[in-house]
Amino acid sequence: MADENVSKNLMDAAFKKKESEEEQKVKEEDKATEGDIITFQKDGQQMEAVVTSARLQNSVVCDMTIMDDFHERNLEFEKTVVAHKNYSIKERRDR
């Protein structure tokens, strides 16, 4: 009887973990595509960038040089990778 309870508790925990992981995934229609402009936080700063590649499974590659103050921010790189869950789409490219 005790083994059955332990087994049931383990199964319940596994299902709850799987459900939690599924809820955290970004829906396909909410993901940015090439040409979209996104906003996100990086090093405590609000950034804006254009998506240059959306071929990665969990993130996008984007170019931050579209910001008017890009050079004043003294950022190390022109491009960065942002996870789907960490950005919002500001503007969709014309389709």
Image (cartoon, helix red, strand yellow):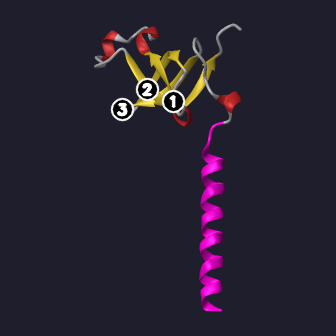
Quarter occupied by residue 73: top left
Residue at (32%, 10%) from the top-left corner? 71
Which numbered tag is attached to residue 81? 2
- Which quarter shows the N terminus? bottom right
Q: Quickly name the residue at label 3.
A: 43
Quarter-of-image position of residue 91: top right
Residue located 36% across and 14% down the image: 78
Q: Depth check: 44 or 53 in front?
A: 53
Split into 4 quadrants, where in the image is the C terminus? top right
Kindly state the secondary structure of the residue where label 2 is placed: strand
Question: Could you tell me which secondary element the residue under label 3 belongs to?
Answer: loop
Q: Which of marks 3 and 2 is nearer the N terminus?
A: 3
Q: Nearer the viewer, mark 3 or mark 2?
A: 2
19, above or below 66, in the image: below
List the residue tagged with mark 1.
Answer: 59
The residue at 49%/16% (across/down) is 49
Mark 3: few, some, or many residues within 10 Å (few <14, many ≥20)?
Answer: few
Is residue 6 rendered to the left or right of residue 77? right
Q: What stretch is highlighted in magenta?
A: 1-26
Structural distance between the alpha carbons of marks 3 and 2 = 13 Å
In-image side of 93 versus 83 (left or right): right
Q: Are marks 3 and 2 in contact (CB under 8 Å)?
A: no
Along the polypeptide, which appears first: circle 3 or circle 1? Answer: 3
Depth check: 95 or 76 in front? 95
Of labels 1 and 2, earlier in sequence is 1
Mark 2 crowdedness (10 Å alpha carbons): few <14, some 14-19, many ≥20: some
Q: Which amino acid is tagged 3?
A: Asp
Which residue is at a point 31% across and 19% down the rendered structure image?
75
Q: Do the residues labelled 3 and 1 touch (CB within 8 Å)?
A: no
Observer-nearest of 70 and 12? 12
